[in-house]
Image: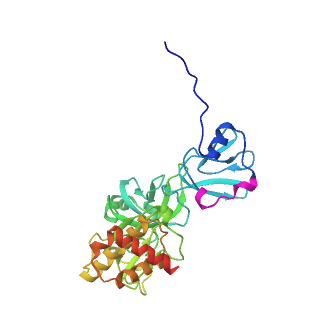
Amino acid sequence: MFSIISPSEPRFDNDVEGERRHGSKQKDAMDFDLDDSENVTSPGQFITSSATFMRGHGTYVDQEEVLASVAGTIERVNKLVSVRALKSRYTGEIGDLVIGRITEVAAKRWKVDVFGRNEGVLMLSSVNLPGGVQRRKLESDELQMRTFFEEGDLLVAEVHQFFNDGAISLHTRSLRYGKLRNGQLVTVSPMLIRRLKSHFVALHCGVDLIIGMNGFIWVSKHAKEFEGQSEEGFEAQAVYSNKNDDIDNATRTAISRVTNIIRILSRHSIPLTDSIIAQAYDWAMEQDSNEVKEMLTDDYGELMVQALLAFR
């Protein structure tokens, strides 16, 4: 004979989860001061009561409870509760400096991958013409668009505005913007990029950094500034050239060392700034072994991170 046994009441090891399921208690406003261990949440996890707090980005409301919709850290501003995702694509703000890759040449525009939720668009009217002539773009200019940028080219630009569909409008109306050469691209999470006074950084080792707010970082040989040269007389061969300059072995080694440092810091989720990269480079040069290929080992990375944390 078979006997039917009714399921027992489920037990929850986590008191907060049990209270959420049974609805017997809700957190008070004064109880929402989270410590570091409780500040990280996962999707579907209970945060607080919707009767006390307002939901922000990364959250949703279910049965008068605010739950996390993404894995991340809980942030609170007065009565607004949001969850900042640990990993996310670049959203973009006007004035941001970004690095992107041309994906398509279309009618009077280039489509650019900026690792964003929406693609970037660089209009033909938003670039400098050879010779710096300020005039309306003609049909002949549209026919020569691939002489400026073509598929696969990397460029640095500035966020100009947003279109109605959310696409990012870019512009390169400056001598500091345009096609990238003589270097290497490193990609990190945009969450690790901090806003700096200048995102064009010249390290003392003869390496230049362009730190894009979208998580793309360009590491290249040091480039001389355009001394005494106005935008009305720049050379198109220098701005739109696809040919790299000659780079000596010492500079190549320095570029590789800086890129490996950025990868190590990214792997350990350390926010990237010009000062922390310079400190890491100085520490790396003080080590007995200067083999660049050994920098990506786990032991080397842990030693570097421990040394950087000790500097703070």
User: Residue 275 versus residue 150: which sits nearer the camera?
Assistant: 275
Report the residue that reaches farthest toward the top: 1
| Residue closest to the eye, 200 or 262 | 262
In the image, 276 versus 186, the foreground residue is 276
Q: Which of 209 and 181 is in front in this view?
A: 209
The answer to whether residue 35 is magenta is yes
Q: Quadrant of residue 240?
A: bottom left
Q: Give the range drawn in magenta.
A: 29-38
Query: 276 left or right of 36?
Result: left
Q: Does the magenta stretch include residue 181?
A: no
Q: Which residue, as the protein is rendered here, is positioned at the far bottom?
A: 228
Identify the image's colour scheme: rainbow, by chain, secondary structure or one colour: rainbow
**Residue 231 appears in the figure:** no
| Residue 10 versus residue 1 in the image, above or below | below
Q: Position of residue 245 (x, y in %)?
A: 27, 77
Hey, which residue is sitting farthest front in the picture?
1
Tell me the residue at 75%/45% (across/down): 51
Quick check: 163 above or below 220?
A: above
**Residue 93 position within the rendered picture, expressed as x and y whole percent measured from the top left:** 55, 62
In the image, is 48 to the left or to the right of 190?
Answer: right
- In the image, what residue occupies the spot 53% across and 63% down? 160
Task: Tell me: residue 152, above or below residue 203.
Answer: above
Q: What x and y, as percent, mark residue 145?
A: 35, 61
Q: Which residue is drawn at 27% across and 77% down?
A: 291
Query: Of helix, strand and loop, which mostly describes the magenta segment?
Result: helix
> Residue 206, how many percent across, how many down?
36, 84
Total number of numbered labels? 0
Asked if residue 211 shows in the view, the reply is yes
The structure residue drawn at horizontal position 36% and vertical position 75%, both measured from the top left corner, is 258
